[in-house]
Image (cartoon, grey):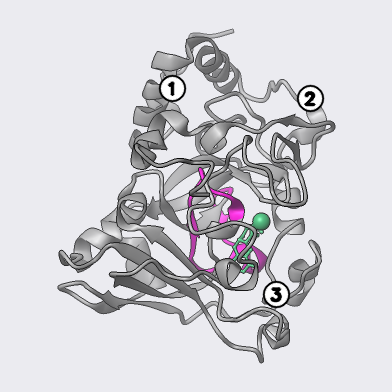
Amino acid sequence: MSKPIKSSEITPEALYLSRRRFIKNTLTMAAVSLYLSACGNQSPAGPTAQPTDSLPLPSAGASVDELGNTLTSYDDIIGYTNYYEFSTDKNGPTRLAQNFKTSPWSVEVGGYVNNARSFSIDELKSLFDQEERIYRMRCVEAWSMVIPWVGFSLHKLLEIVEPTSDARFVRFETLYDPDQMPGQRNSFFPFPYIEGLRLDEAMHDLTIMATGLYGRDLSPQNGAPLRLVVPWKYGFKSIKSIVKIDLVGEMPTSLWMASGPNEYGFYANVNPNVPHPRWSQATERRIGEGGRIDTLLFNGYEEEVAYLYDGMDLSIDF
Ligand SMILES: Nc1nc2c(c(=O)[nH]1)N[C@H]1C(S)=C(S)[C@@H](COP(=O)(O)O)O[C@H]1N2
Ligand SMILES: [Mo]
């Protein structure tokens, strides 16, 4: 093995900094992860979980996250999705979203801000460096993936519009267009899809707006052209195809809070100790791999985000 690559060469600055925090606390795992990154394609999970060869690899060819988890293959990420605007089948959106029109596209940012305005996708891409973030994604249904997203931290966008002192929450809204999104005719769900974050969660550096994955633009079924990714929360918080972002004073009511009020509430932080009413959240199935693995508190981002919930009882506020 040649001399190890410095982690600053493997990951963008922000992830490098968060990785340094991981190293402080989980030296062994981080060292294993860095070793594996430095050595290219070796992975603890074996050859079946490798990214497809012909597709672009994430920057510097990283094949694992900071905990040593193998990246989910590109084919699995685009072939197994949750996107109820198109279908409730995992492979339905892959087919049904194929002709979804993602250009032109703009997102309206307003509410309690000093500079309300709309941004085109091209503007967002040129205003903010697009960086890669390798994040675990844990669906509330107890499956998970490891995804190399491309995007930018949401706080950069919020800093431009300048939230006023009345802003306490951020509300996100997906496109409403039943002609293009046949699932929106399903009257069980109160479309458009709405999600929300507390302002401090939205300002956290790990919270990103994703424009791509595996070094490519997002596929329609993964939420093109612009989606939220909040890696320490269940996947349903990471709302797709966003057209509107509002800074608001009251906690927004999400689509899931409205349609399943006895399931999860606003926070939906990944927590192995709080079961879903119908199943345990203690373990998860990593797509593309066999068996089950333990689910981690805050999806493994506890060191980064636990302070946001100081003084809250996570067995009540979930
Ligand atoms: N607008 C919208 N956003 C959504 C969903 C959806 O149905 N509609 N599904 C959510 C759920 S349940 C999960 S697990 C993730 C899945 O992201 P992926 O399909 O890109 O893996 O998207 C979330 N964002
Ligand atoms: Mo999900």
What residue does disc 3 label?
A: 97
Q: Residue 307's image quarter? A: top left
| Residue 58 placement, left or right of 287 | left
What residue does disc 1 label?
A: 22
Tell me which amino acid carries mark 2.
Answer: Gly
Foreground mark, 1 or 3, reads: 1
Instruction: Give coordinates of residue 145: x percent, y percent.
Output: 67, 43
| Residue 231 placement, left or right of 252 | right
Residue at screen point 41% across, 50% down: 207
Does residue 285 show up magenta in the picture?
Answer: no
Numbered circle sitting on residue 252: none
Distance of label 2 from label 3 (alpha carbons): 32 Å
Instruction: Give coordinates of residue 194: x percent, y percent.
Output: 51, 72
In terms of sequence position, does the residue under pointer 1 or pointer 3 come before the other? 1
What residue does disc 2 label?
A: 46
Distance of label 2 from label 1 (alpha carbons): 24 Å
Distance of label 1 from label 3 (alpha carbons): 38 Å
Instruction: Give coordinates of residue 12: x percent, y percent.
Output: 38, 36
